[in-house]
Amino acid sequence: MSEVLTPISLDGKAEALLVPGAEPLWIRVDNMQVGITRTDEGVVVDITPLGRNTVIASTYAFSQEAKDLLEGDEDGPPVL
């Protein structure tokens, strides 16, 4: 059985919250898939060719770094 995905078009804002213990969130973009994974220390984002496990780009961010920047920012966090 093949997986059926519904194409979506998002106008304006779209948000998702990855709670502790959540599975990675996968977003398909053309012939790539973008995986967003919550970790104990922050977030990891991996990009792979569609249907493959070979990572062609990756980045990460630490929650503590974001917290430090937000606490030092007089204007507050950006509005999404």
Image: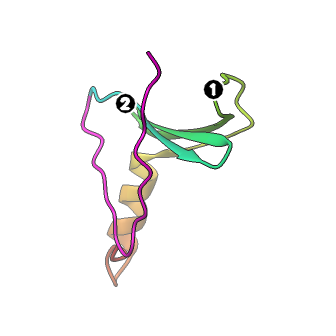
Image colouring: rainbow
What secondary structure is marked by label 1? loop
- Residue 63 magenta: no
Queried whether the magenta region covers residue 12, the answer comes back as yes
- For the N terminus, the quadrant is top left
Which quarter of the picture shows residue 32? top right
- Outermost residue on the bottom side: it is 75
Q: Nearer the viewer, residue 53 or 37?
A: 53
Image position of 37 with respect to 63: above or below: above
Tell me which segment is drawn in magenta: 1-20
Q: Residue at x 75, y 36 (%)?
A: 56
In the image, taking residue 17 as reference, residue 78 lies left or right, namely right
Q: Residue visible at 41% across and 32% down?
A: 24
Left or right of residue 67, residue 19 in this image = left
Camera-side residue of 28 and 65:
28
Please name which of the two marks, 2 or 1, marks the residue nearer to the observer.
Answer: 1
Examine the image and state in which quarter residue 46 appears: top right
Residue 65 horizontal/vertical position (percent) = 45, 53
Q: Which disc is residue 30 wearing?
A: none
Which residue is the site of mark 1?
A: 51
Image point (66%, 22%), residue name: 53
Count neighbours of disc 1 (C-alpha within 10 A) and say few if under 14, some if 14 to 19, many if 20 or more: few
**Residue 61 picture location, percent across and down:** 51, 47
Q: Which residue is mark 2?
A: 40
Which is more N-terminal, label 1 or label 2? 2
Q: Is residue 65 above or below residue 78?
A: above
- Residue at 39%, 73% (x, y): give it: 11
Name the image quarter holding residue 45. top right
Q: Residues within 10 Å of mark 2 (few under 14, many from 20)?
A: few
- The amino acid beneath tag 2 is Asp
